[in-house]
Amino acid sequence: MKQRTLGRTGQRVSEIGFGAWAIGGTWGEVSQQDAEATLHAALDAGITFIDTADIYGDGRSEKIIAGVLNQRGGERPFVATKLGRRLSPHVADGYNASNLNAFVDRSRENPQTDTLDLVQLHCPPTEVYYNPEVFAVMDEMVAAGKIRQQAADYGGAAADLSGEDRPLRASALVVACLQRLDARPGRAPRPLEVISPSQPVTSTTSPMK
């Protein structure tokens, strides 16, 4: 399995990562046995990067990952999780210190770890990217040892933020869907190098975002 450096984290990870949305059961029923077997197969194949989120199965994905890694022991892969999508309504004001800390504390409990490798804002409203107070709160959690790195998942907002405007932290997750790449009515899809010019990017694929 080829390795590359993940954004600005300095962490070397497999070029192909394991997307843990499906094992959360969001897309349909996935048994515990099948979910664990799938993750074991990915790790056996040399994958060392796992992408999950607190909303994937409302924490089920994070818990399954923790269980499998505890079973295996040894050197652990790099696990990136995401937060914010549990907000209801999902509005910029919800990205405050109280909520962000609560989300991170819950995600630390789910994977049974004191420090999360990487926490990303999960496709927040565009104005959140321009709010330095949000990133200051994330920096405080890094300093407190709750998380090692912080970043952002740009999702559809990648099209609305130029490379210069985008406040890149440790890494950027730009979602490249199999069925579309930033497709919108009346506009042709734009290639990844246009959406994220000259920025270190971690790309992943999913059938829908």
Image (cartoon, rainbow, N blue to C red):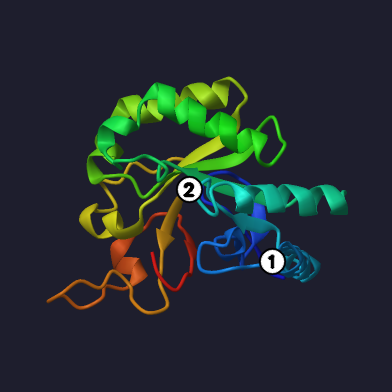
Q: Is residue 170 visible?
A: no
Labelled disc at residue 44: none
Q: Residue 178: percent from the left, percent from the top?
A: 42, 78
Which numbered disc covers residue 31? 1
Q: Position of residue 162 (x, y in %)?
A: 24, 53
The residue that label 2 is drawn on is 171
Q: Report which quarter residue 112 is drawn in.
A: top right
Mark 2 residue crowding within 10 angstroms, few (<14) / some (14–19) / many (20+): many
Q: CA distance from mark 2 to mark 1?
A: 32 Å
Q: Quadrant of residue 177?
A: bottom left
Q: Determine whether, in the image, residue 148 is placed left or right of residue 69.
A: left
Query: Helix, strand, or loop for circle 1?
Result: loop
Tell me the SS state at disc 2. loop
Q: Residue at x 53, y 54 (%)?
A: 56
Q: Amino acid at mark 1?
A: Ser
- Residue 196 in picture, x, y percent from top left: 34, 60
Q: Where is the N terminus found, in terms of image quarters?
A: bottom right
What is the three-letter code of the residue carrying label 2? Answer: Ser
Q: Is residue 117 visible?
A: yes
Q: Nearer the viewer, mark 2 or mark 1?
A: 1
The answer to whether the residue labelled 2 contacts the one labelled 1, judged by CB atoms less than 8 Å apart, is no
Left or right: 60 in relation to 161: right
